[in-house]
Image (cartoon, rainbow, N blue to C red):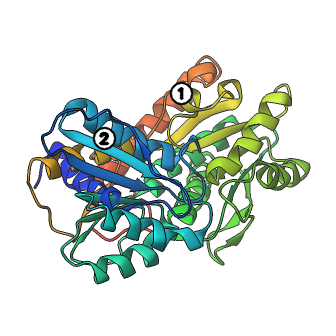
């Protein structure tokens, strides 16, 4: 069995590959280097999803990973281009191919089809992708079983609610989104079963795979509309799985003066958003470490197989829940211990977390 470090390295390598391909459609790539020497540097190029580089979520996490790779190896140059619409994916990726990027990273499940198409057209180009596995030999997939950590978050929310109602909503119904929602509602159900309670989980029905969506990763007003409706139904803890759209929810929760609070996703919301006082915890994807190690490994000349790629879990620290920050004194010690035990039980296989959206291993 590979070591945790080895697994992380594998995942990052994949991501780095993708970054190379990414290029701008109608926008110049943003460089993050001042290459002055004549030596050829290893170029890692990233194409963002429409949420952009400052989404406080998965795009920002992937860019952080590239920055950390560059910091670890000054022979690595990095750049990114932001997609303004889904129609930009293919031209952006193609631009980076034409620029002869060594490693092209695509970020987000919505980019899977475009990445697969460009990868097939350029079989000698190395790509990486976050949150998808298109199944191409030259695309290294990096996926995360966030249902496991979201299960912890659902249990935590059920233990913290005062209204007896908690909620989640997504941006769009794609696997990297619904996997969080599946885990969250199952965590609530596990709390109810364990405690003999009846906390309701609004916004998502795991059986029908139907629920509430903002229909965008980049529109805070739409995120706020969805969470306002859930609050009106009585929810006092909400987990948006909607990238930048979720910032509409965290900002409104902060402004509510404690009427309701939130759980963030992807990257610790207390480190990435101004709304820490309204964020109980975050369901974290360790995208930065995965991207960093993948790019560093790729720059060293190592090649990783495209399948099965990397799957982050609680056991290998690919997913986790963040510290409680401002809520640390508000979460009862007993509940903290129970949430910690759930992590150990999931990692050991004592508790099995399932989702139709789980990545294959």
Q: Is residue 132 left or right of residue 202?
A: left
Closer to us: 248 or 167: 248
Binning the other alpha carbons within 10 Å of mark 1 as few (below 14), some (14 to 19) or many (20 upward) gives: few
Residue at 76% from the left image edge and 48% from the top image edge: 220
From this view, report whether residue 39 is shown above or below residue 134.
above
Q: Quadrant of residue 99?
A: bottom left
Q: Is residue 186 visible?
A: yes
Q: CA distance from mark 2 to mark 1?
A: 16 Å
Q: Which residue is mark 1?
A: 271
Q: Quadrant of the C terminus?
A: bottom left
Residue at 15% from the left image edge and 46% from the top image edge: 40
From this view, report whether residue 287 is shown above or below residue 201.
above
Residue 60 location (% of width, % of height): 49, 43
Q: Which residue is mark 2?
A: 289
Question: What element does badge 1 sit on?
Answer: helix
Q: Earlier in the sequence, mark 2 or mark 1?
A: 1
Q: Is residue 3 left or right of residue 88?
A: left
Closer to us: 17 or 36: 36
Q: Is residue 357 visible?
A: no
From this view, report whether residue 217 is shown above or below residue 73.
below
Closer to us: 112 or 99: 99
Q: Is residue 266 left or right of residue 326?
A: left
Residue at 81% from the left image edge and 48% from the top image edge: 224
Question: What element does badge 2 sit on?
Answer: helix
Q: Residue furthest top?
A: 329
Closer to us: 80 or 98: 98
Q: Quadrant of the N terminus?
A: bottom left
Q: Quadrant of residue 263?
A: top right
Residue 55 location (% of width, % of height): 59, 45
């Amino acid at each position: 069995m590979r070591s945790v470090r080895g697994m992380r390295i594998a995942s990052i390598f994949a991501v780095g590959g993708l970054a190379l391909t990414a290029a701008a459609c109608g926008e110049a790539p943003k460089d993050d280097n001042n290459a002055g020497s004549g030596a050829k540097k290893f170029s890692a190029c990233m194409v963002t999803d429409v949420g952009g580089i400052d989404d406080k979520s998965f795009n920002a996490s992937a860019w952080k990973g590239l920055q950390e790779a560059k910091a670890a190896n000054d022979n690595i140059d990095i750049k990114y281009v932001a997609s303004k619409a889904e129609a930009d994916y293919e031209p952006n990726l193609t631009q980076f191919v034409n620029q002869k990027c060594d490693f092209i990273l695509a970020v987000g499940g919505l980019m899977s089809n475009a990445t697969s198409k460009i990868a097939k057209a350029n079989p000698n180009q190395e790509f990486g992708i976050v949150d998808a596995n298109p199944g191409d030999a030259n695309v290294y997939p990096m996926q995360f079983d966030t249902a496991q950590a979201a299960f912890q978050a659902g249990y935590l929310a059920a233990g913290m609610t005062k209204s007896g109602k908690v909620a989640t909503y997504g941006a769009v119904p794609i696997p990297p989104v619904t996997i969080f929602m599946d885990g969250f509602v199952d965590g609530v159900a596990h709390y109810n079963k364990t405690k003999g309670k009846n906390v309701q989980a609004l916004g998502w029905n795991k059986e029908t795979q139907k629920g509430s969506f903002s229909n965008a990763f980049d529109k805070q007003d739409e995120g706020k509309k969805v969470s306002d409706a859930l609050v009106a139904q009585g929810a006092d803890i909400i987990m948006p799985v909607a990238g930048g759209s979720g910032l509409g929810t965290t900002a409104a929760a902060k402004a509510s003066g404690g009427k309701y609070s939130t759980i963030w996703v992807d990257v610790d919301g207390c480190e990435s958003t101004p709304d820490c006082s309204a964020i109980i915890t975050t369901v974290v994807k360790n995208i930065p470490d995965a991207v960093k190690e993948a790019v560093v490994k790729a720059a060293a000349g190592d090649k990783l197989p495209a399948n099965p790629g990397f799957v982050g879990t609680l056991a290998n620290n690919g997913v986790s829940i963040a510290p409680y920050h401002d809520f640390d004194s508000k979460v009862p010690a007993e509940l903290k211990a129970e949430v910690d035990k759930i992590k150990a039980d999931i990692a050991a296989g004592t508790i099995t977390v399932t989702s139709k959206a789980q990545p294959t291993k």
